[in-house]
Image (cartoon, rainbow, N blue to C red):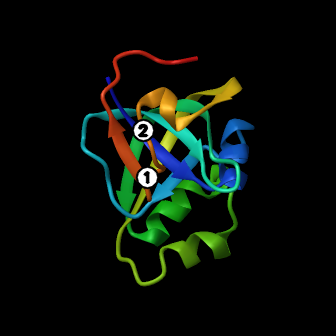
Amino acid sequence: MSTMLLSIKPEYAKVILEGKKQYEFRKIKPKEYVNHIILYASSPQKQVVGEAVIDEILEGTPKEIWEITKSAAGITRKLFFSYYAGKDKAVAYKLKDVVTYKVPKELSDYGISQAPQSFIYLDRTETVL
């Protein structure tokens, strides 16, 4: 199992953990073998708040991806298309088995000293609950 730690704005991390946002949108696709994410709620929260399994990675034009994900995107159409403005490609991680940490963790718990701009790969073989 390969894992990446994603920096996500706290408001989006919250709706992922609540199950209202079942897709995480990015502009680039990760390495093929990544199937697990750790959710880092960025500033002002600055804590690792949960994790999820990547069920599927979708790629297509922003319009195609919106049509597939809109019912569980957890964001507005306007925000979605604003994020992909000027881009020909959109990537969506379909999330499942989302776990909220009862006690948020620190980046140092993962051997990381500073938050990644977007994401970093972690070398992990087990889930930390």
Image position of 51 with respect to 77: above or below: above
Image position of 78 with respect to 127: above or below: below
Q: Could you say which is closer to the camera, residue 128 or residue 46?
A: 46
Mark 2 secondary-structure assignment? loop
Tell me the distance, in whole angstroms, between the alpha carbons under discs 2 and 1: 9 Å
Q: Is residue 5 left or right of residue 17?
A: left
Image position of 43 with respect to 86: above or below: above
Tell me where residue 62 sits by quadrant: bottom left
The residue indicated by pointer 1 is 116
Q: Residue at x 31, y 48 (%)?
A: 30
Q: Are marks 2 and 1 in contact (CB under 8 Å)?
A: yes
Quadrant in the picture for the N terminus: top left
Question: 10 Å neighbourhood of mark 2: few (<14), some, or many (≥20)?
Answer: few
Q: Could you say which is closer to the camera, residue 26 or residue 109?
A: 109
Q: Residue at x 48, y 81 (%)?
A: 85
The residue indicated by pointer 2 is 112
Q: Amino acid at mark 2?
A: Ile
**x then y, percent, for residue 120:** 36, 45
Q: Which mark is residue 42?
A: none
Q: Amino acid at mark 1?
A: Pro
Quadrant in the picture for the C terminus: top right
Q: Residue at x 65, y 56 (%)?
A: 43
**x then y, percent, for residue 98:** 60, 29
Tell me where residue 49 sits by quadrant: top right
